[in-house]
Image (tube, grey):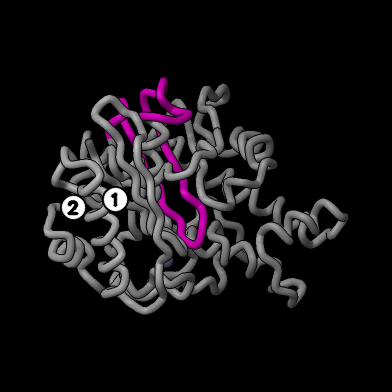
């Protein structure tokens, strides 16, 4: 049996997956805002509870967490504080067990390839669009991490095929500018609406406004369709996946699955495209299950 944790937004999720891929146990704790010691304490409590209930648990724990290759603090959520600490060392010391880390994009790619909508896919690419932007790639249901463990770290790559006004400003918290995260994260989308209207709306409110004839909201979402179209097309040109999965809260916009593939012909290197764009499976604990399968695979 394999235990996975997902540290994401305001929750720490835990899931146990058996060797035969059955999801048999789950538990969540809130992610407190008072620093790393509290986070480590909650993770330790979850792991202790899981191992008490399941004595045959694998010693190694898989963990989906904001990756810390950029040693700067993000303003987008409470997880920014994690960037400046060595998560692997801290978690292993606290849990008293080996841990395997992956980004939410990598955990989601593994979940979808092994248990979700990409089980028949030979090559799967995933974009996780939420407070942060992450990606993941699996080949034959195995996560491909690369020589430097940065496969899928696309959030701080530049936007593909930028138009002139997209090259202005857009300073990212990572120190670069014009990063995908400034365009395709929740904060980036909300800023797009705010910069035109001086009104702060979240993604649900922007989508509702677009449905009720708010022309600015409609325009912001059309631009989002195109930017996700360009981003996914650039990744398809590199990896040529069978299935492309979108996850995170931005992926809940149903319009993307019609509009984004319509953008591809302008950007793909081929005329006829077999890649399927799908929304991530709507199941609880998917990231924690993907993290658990990091250990099994
Ligand atoms: Zn950046």
Q: Which residues are magenta?
A: 114-142
Question: Helix, strand or loop at disc 2?
Answer: strand
Question: In the picture, which quadrant includes the N terminus?
Answer: top left
Label 2 beta carbon within 8 A of ligand 1: no
Above or below residue 59? Residue 116 is above
Image quarter of residue 79: bottom left
Question: Helix, strand or loop at disc 1?
Answer: strand
Above or below residue 226? Residue 133 is below
Which x, y percent locates residue 186? 57, 61
Name the one closer to the observer, 245 or 226: 245
Above or below residue 117? Residue 210 is below
Q: Residue at x 38, y 37 (%)?
A: 111
* For discs 1 and 2, the disc positioned in front in the rendered view: 2
Image quarter of residue 291: top left
Which x, y percent locates residue 236? 46, 36
Q: Residue furthest front?
A: 53
Question: In the picture, which quadrant includes the C terminus?
Answer: top left
The reply to whether residue 175 is in sight is no
- Residue 138's label in the rendered image is none
Q: Residue at x 87, y 55 (%)?
A: 213
Mark 1 and mark 2: Cα distance apart in space: 10 Å
The reply to whether residue 217 is in sight is yes
Q: Residue at x 48, y 43 (%)?
A: 284
Q: For mark 1, what is the residue?
A: 102
Residue 140 magenta: yes
Which x, y percent locates residue 127? 46, 46
Give left or right: position of 88 versus 218: left
Q: Residue at x 40, y 72 (%)?
A: 32
> Is the residue marked by circle 2 packed among few (<14), some (14-19), or many (20+) residues within 10 Å?
many
Q: For mark 2, what is the residue?
A: 99
Give left or right: position of 114 versus 168: left
Which x, y percent locates residue 81? 34, 75
């Amino acid at each position: 049996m394999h235990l996975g944790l997902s540290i994401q937004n305001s929750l720490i999720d835990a899931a146990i997956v058996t060797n035969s891929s059955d999801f048999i146990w789950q538990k969540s704790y809130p992610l407190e805002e008072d620093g790393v010691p509290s986070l480590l304490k909650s993770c330790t409590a979850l792991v202790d509870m899981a191992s008490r209930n399941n004595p045959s648990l694998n010693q190694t724990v898989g963990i989906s967490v904001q990756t810390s290759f950029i040693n700067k603090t993000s303003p987008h959520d409470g997880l920014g504080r994690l960037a400046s600490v060595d998560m692997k060392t801290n978690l292993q010391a606290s849990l008293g067990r080996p841990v395997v880390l992956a980004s939410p994009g990598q955990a989601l790619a593994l979940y979808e390839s092994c248990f979700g909508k990409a089980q028949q896919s030979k090559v799967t690419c995933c974009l996780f669009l939420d407070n942060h932007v992450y990606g993941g790639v699996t080949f034959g249901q195995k996560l491909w991490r690369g020589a430097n463990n940065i496969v899928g770290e696309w959030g701080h790559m530049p936007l593909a095929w930028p138009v002139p006004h997209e090259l202005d400003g857009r300073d990212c918290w990572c120190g670069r500018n014009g990063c995908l995260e400034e365009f395709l994260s929740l904060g980036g989308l909300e800023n797009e609406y705010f910069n035109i209207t001086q009104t702060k709306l979240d993604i649900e409110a922007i989508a509702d406004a677009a449905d009720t004839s708010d022309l600015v909201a409609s325009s912001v979402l059309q631009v989002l369709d195109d930017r996700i179209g360009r981003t996914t097309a650039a990744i398809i040109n590199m990896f040529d996946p069978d299935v492309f999965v979108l996850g995170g809260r931005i992926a809940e916009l149903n319009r993307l699955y019609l509009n984004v593939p319509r953008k591809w012909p302008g950007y793909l290197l081929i005329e006829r495209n077999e890649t399927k764009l799908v929304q991530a499976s709507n199941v609880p604990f998917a990231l924690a299950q993907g993290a658990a399968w990091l250990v099994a695979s």
